Every structure is written in structure tokens, then in C-alpha cells.
Image (cartoon, helix red, strand yellow):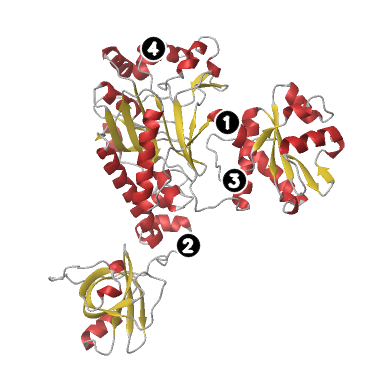
Amino acid sequence: MSEFLQGMKRTRMCGELRLENASEVVTVMGWVQRRRNLGSLIFVDLRDRTGIVQVVFDETTEKSLFEKAAAIRSEYVLAVSGTVRERESKTNKIATGDIEILADTLKILSEADTTPFEITDDTNVNENLRLKYRYLDLRRPSLQQKLITRSKIAVATRNYLAENGFLEIETPYLGKSTPEGARDYLVPSRIKEGCFYALPQSPQLYKQLLMIAGYDRYFQIAKCFRDEDLRANRQPEFTQIDLEMSFVEDETDVMYPVEGLIKRIFKDSIGMELPEGHFRTMTWQEAMDRFGSDKPDTRFGLELKNVSDIFVGSDFKVFADCVTEGKSVRAINAKGFASKLSRKDLDGLSEVAKTFGAKGLAWLSKTGTEVRSSFNKFLTEEIIAKLTERMDLQDGDVLLFAADKDTVVFNTLGGIRLYLGDKYNLYDRQSYDILWIVDFPMFEYSEEEGRYVAMHHPFTAPKDEDLYLLDSDPTKMRAKAYDIVINGQEAGGGSIRIHSRELQKKIFNVLSFTDEDIERKFGFFVNAFNYGTPPHGGLALGLDRFTMLLTGTDSIKDVIAFPKVQNASCLMSEAPSTVDKKQLDELYLTVSDKN
């Protein structure tokens, strides 16, 4: 039977107590991590979200209290009062390892059945089982610390932005579907038959409207929804730190305040002081050319080099033909890897390359004066000499080549360098590499849609110096867009927005939107441009991904209290689920059998 507290008030948290608290009479409450009965001694490890403290019942304990303690089991919820004293046998495994509580009062507030798995950080139980019983999984200290860090990030964000003149304003969850990006989650309307709301993929339109409305500096910790395939750092519902600013002149007017926010987040959430000064900036083109990625991890080398010219007219037709067709040949130098990569390893790398879209991966290694290669019979002394100079080829090095369209080559060698960096520990996993990527292409051509599409979104402003290309060659235009990259992860991104209705109309035209398309998708938004629009820009940081980076986890599920699995379902609540026919009828919906 559970007991009422009956006047007991918690005075301390379990993980707070230290040696300086010795002789204090305290009351703690929490869950039983472990109970050890040694006959005349009973030890109970009591846990709350701050940590664990050892509670002791010994020969001085009243008999009825001792018998009650003997009945305790794991995950029982207890209230314990007693005196803090120094432990005879100290431990550094827990923060309270110098002390213990000699109990004089015990109340069992709730009993517990045997849990489906042990509540410890080193559990090897199947993830699906842990997610089914997520409320138990969340008791594990490591997950609790991650969610505590997430809370600190949110608090630091609110404090910093409020101090800098930002207003926290909520925007609607139920809005209009404006399909330009991922698939929308739709919500049927009961009032308007056959009509649907869309859950927001971001507050983009609303926050720009707030600038038109004169609110100058806005922010929101916003829930967003995208119906797309999941992966380790993506969920169907996610949270972003969203902000927008009016009367900005250029990209740095947004980037620099965000740098201050990021520095505050690091300090307040994990106690890390980032260096003074602005973060590094790298153009999109440089990032692609050097790292094969627009979110480069620059904590290690293995940089790409263009070697296309070296193979012009060579007998190695695979490379020579690529150059003739306007494609490229690029390589990375895995310095010192000749002793690490066997022929089997190199064949394995070729298979890895295929997962990134390449047909394979060519290689060349140098050991002493001997040069070996997967295309050995096509090598000449001239090619070897040029590669040696271009790639700084030295004894013990391995060159890895990819040849194809730039997009494939970048994706392949960018992926290979990350694969090698991770597998061979080429970087300090405790360090933070932060930089801005700027000058993104304004447009990219979609073969699937047969038209230009916006690389960011249709409301991103082009670089002023590239406006002349709008009518002649829009693919060469650069955008006033910027991404913040941390350890090879896109932690956030934004842009200066278009505030001219004439320019916005031209951008829509490049994107092949008809007047009917514009009115149907964005009518309420573009109409607002008729009433005075200030220059404005903004950015969104992914709160989930940011928390991942600061807590050192590889899975976004670790930093969301109740996440979804690969098929966007919740194993705990069994959502999504079927609903009553009455509910469907009210929404004018029928469910058909796909079979």
C-alpha cells in the first residue's frame, strides 16, 4: 500500500548533498535505483533527476522501520528523512560518494512492478522496447541530462533574445498549405467541407508578416512539422529557434546577433566559453570545392583537389572522357594511409562510394618509390609527377579519386572523407568547429520538375551584385543566405528576405509560378507587400540538432522526450491510430482500402 506524505516536505534533492552537509537533517524523495540487504545493514540508492544518494538502515534503526526497508524493491518511490553523515567507504562513481543518509523516517509512496528493462545507462536492451516504455527510459540519468541541457538551451535563448530587444510571439499551427518544399501534414476542417489546414513546416510567412506589421524583432521556439522520410537527425515534428529582424542592411546584421546567442547558449548550457570575435566564414563554392559539402566538418583535412586538367587527353578514358563531357575528376590525399588501407579496404571504400552515387572509387598509393594504382597501366611518369605536385603525394600516402558530374563527385568524396574521419578518429570529438557558409546559389535546376527551384525558399533575396543575371543566367546568381555549421552539421540557416514586390514577382517568374499559382499559394502574403515592407532577414536554429551537438549524441531521439520511429509512429502511444467512423463522418472523410 502506498503512503501519504503526511506532513513530510522534501528539503533537498538527492544529488545535491556533499560532505559539507554532514550532520544536517534532510528529507529526500525519489526512485529506488538499487537495494542491498546485508542482514544487519540495508543500503538503498535513491535517485532523482539530480543524481543518486545512498540511504542507510542499520542496527540503530527502529525495528519496524528496518522491516519496511527490507520490503523495498527497485523503482519503488520513497520519501526518506534522516541525518547526513560521512561515508566510511567513499566512492567517486557518484557525486554524493562522500556521504550517506542514516534514515529515521521512511514512507513508501508507490510500489513498482518489475520493469521490462533495468533503469541504467549501460543497458543493451532493444531500442524499440525502450521507446515502448519511454516513460521508464526517460528515468535513465543520461537521457535526463540531455533533456536538462535542452531546457538550459531554451532558457538561455529566451534570456539572450529578450535582453536584445526581441519579442516572443506565437504563430499559428493551423495554417494554409503552401507546398514548396517537404510534404505537408494536413488537418481536415469540420466546418468547411473538403478543406484542410496544414501544420507549419516553419513559421516563415508569418514571421515575415510580423516584420511588415512593425514588430521589428521577433523570436519563437516553434514546433514545426514535415511529412518526410526519417533519419538519425530528423523527426516528423521538430523544434526550431526562429527569429526575424527588420531594417537589416546585409547578412552580418543577422549573423552577428546570432553569434552572440550561440555563445550564450554554449556558456549557459554546457559551461563552455567560445573564443571572442566572429565565427569563420566560408563561401558555398569554397566549401564544395574543398570539402565536397555545404556543411563541412573542418576539424580534419582530407580536402578535395580538382585534378581534371591532369587527365585531359590521357589513355585512361574513364577520366579523360569525363573531362571532355564537362564533368570533373577530383581526389583526396589520405596521408599516411598506405599502411592502414589494404587492398580489401580499398575495395570496401569503392563500395562505400557507390552508396553516394558514384560508379566506384579509383586509388593510387605510394610506398617508398613504388606507385601502385587501380589504373596502373594508364599511368605515365608525367601524370605521376603532376599528381605528386598537385596532391602533395609523399611516401605512405593514398590518393582516392572520383570522376563524374560535380554533384556526384562532391557527394562521393565528401562522404568518403567523413567516413575515413569517423572510422580512423581523425578529429577531436570533444571539440567544436563552428563556421558560417555564405553565398549559396540562388537557384538550382530540377530535372524532375523541369524548372528552376529555390535552393532555400522563394523569399530569399539575391546578392545585389548578381541582380543583372536574373534575366540572362539565373543559375549563376548567389543568394543572401547563410547557414551556421557546427561539426559538419547544419545547425541553422537563414537569409535576407526580398522586400520589393517587383523583385519578388520576378523571382516567382523564374520559378515558373503563374499568377494563379502565386495567388493560390501565397496570395495573402504577397498582398501584404502592397502596404510598406521594411528590409528584413532572419534565421532558424534547429533546437533538437543543437541539443544533439551539445550533448554528444548521434540520435535526435535522445533529445526529444517522446520521439517517433522510422515509420513516423510512436511505439508508446501507438499513434497514428484509427478513429471512430463518427469522427470521420464529421470531417466528411472516408478511408479506402488500398488493397
Q: Nearer the viewer, mark 3 or mark 2?
A: 3
* Quadrant (top left, top right, bottom left, bottom right) of the N terminus: bottom left
Whether residue 495 is visible, yes or no, is yes
Q: Nearer the viewer, mark 2 or mark 1?
A: 1
Residue denoted by label 4: 516
Whichever of labels 3 and 1 marks the residue nearer the N terminus, that label is 1
The label shown at residue 300 is 3
The Cα–Cα distance between marks 2 and 1, rounded to whole angstroms, is 44 Å
Outermost residue, left side? 7
The Cα–Cα distance between marks 3 and 4, rounded to whole angstroms, is 50 Å
Mark 1 residue type = Glu
Mark 4 residue type = Glu
3 and 1 marks in contact (CB < 8 Å): no
In the rendered image, the vertical position of residue 399 relative to residue 498, given as above or below: below
Residue 52, quarter of picture: bottom left
Residue denoted by label 1: 286
Whichever of labels 2 and 1 marks the residue nearer the N terminus, that label is 2
Whichever of labels 2 and 4 marks the residue nearer the N terminus, that label is 2
